[in-house]
Image: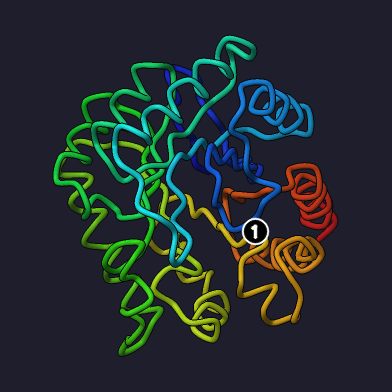
Amino acid sequence: MYTLNCNGSLVNLSTPAIMGIVNVTTDSFYEGSRATKADDIVNKASRMLEDGATFLDVGGYSTRPGAEEVSETEELQRVLPAIEAIIKNFPKAIISIDTFRANVAQKALETGAAMVNDISGGLLDPEMLSTVARFQVPYIMMHMRGNPHTMMENTTYENITTDILHYFSERLAAARSAGINDVIVDPGFGFSKTREQNFELFNHLELFNALQTPVLVGISRKSMIYKTLQTSPEEALNGTTALHSIALQKGASILRVHDVKEAVECVTLYQNLKQGS
């Protein structure tokens, strides 16, 4: 059983939790995840919290392949007002800041965020681990090679599952050495991985439980789903739900999703299935 200390509130992950995606961007791959106006952000947060989200993941930098570069100043101008608006309307909301920049993480945490979601595992900003440790918040470290603009040039592995497990063993050691207590690992589906590699990795997802940390799965409406089904992100909810069910069976502790209600239903059915075994 894992627990996370989020600004003094303990979150018990004995029941898998749902993290709702709030993209304060204009170019995230799924248009339905975007919210740039204050009212839209608050409405999206309200709906996700009502539907059962434990966390809200606020990001101001699209990391889809080919996304435009976003300056640190612009990223801050996007995410800080969003965090302020959510906290003002929902003071108990647990907000994650989705960034690989330590200064953005710091200012977001000072504004009210309670955890950090870093696609680079601390490798794109040498100050990230010490910043997270200073605030003593949970840290989600993802696997990616290079940066969002070069990641799909780095998809050669000796064995994708063992290579990524080795990556996490090193990054977990670095996080522990920095003084971070609560670490969540995210295998990084879609980042530095071909569609076929995503499925190979997903097929061995249960092996990540050996790291003895919560595992976050972020596959919602991604290309591994919609390209396989020859559809679009807008039509990929059913495929997402199918893989979410399998991810839960393989030990996922957190699902990062666009569609909270459907993901919560997956967890409810999975929990009842476990109780009936």
Q: Is residue 170 shown above or below 86?
A: below
Q: How is the image coloured?
A: rainbow
For the point 59% across and 38% down, which residue is it?
22
For the point 24% across and 50% down, which residue is it?
122
Q: Is residue 32 shown above or below 156?
A: above
Q: Position of residue 133 (x, y in %)?
A: 23, 32
Q: Position of residue 270 (x, y in %)?
A: 78, 55
Which one is in front, 271 or 71?
71
| 136 lies left or right of 217 | left
Q: Amino acid at mark 1?
A: Ser
Whether residue 240 is visible to the viewer of this picture, yes or no, is: yes
Which one is in front, 161 or 87?
87
Which one is in front, 33 or 53?
33
For the point 57% across and 50% down, which residue is it?
253
Q: Position of residue 38 (x, y in %)?
A: 61, 21
Whether residue 5 is visible to the viewer of this picture, yes or no, is: no
Q: Quadrant of the C terminus?
A: bottom right
Local secondary structure at mark 1: loop
Q: Is residue 83 shown above or below 256?
A: above
> Which residue, as the protein is rendered here, is positioned at the far bottom?
158
Quadrant in which residue 34 is drawn? top right
Question: How many numbered tags mark residues here?
Answer: 1
| 152 lies left or right of 102 | right
Q: Which residue is mark 1?
A: 220
Neighbour tally class for label 1: few under 14, some 14-19, many 20 plus, Cα within 10 Å: many
Q: Position of residue 20 (x, y in %)?
A: 63, 40
Q: Is residue 158 shown above or below 250?
A: below
Which one is in front, 201 or 149?
149
For the point 53% across and 37% down, which residue is it?
24
| 30 lies left or right of 194 | right
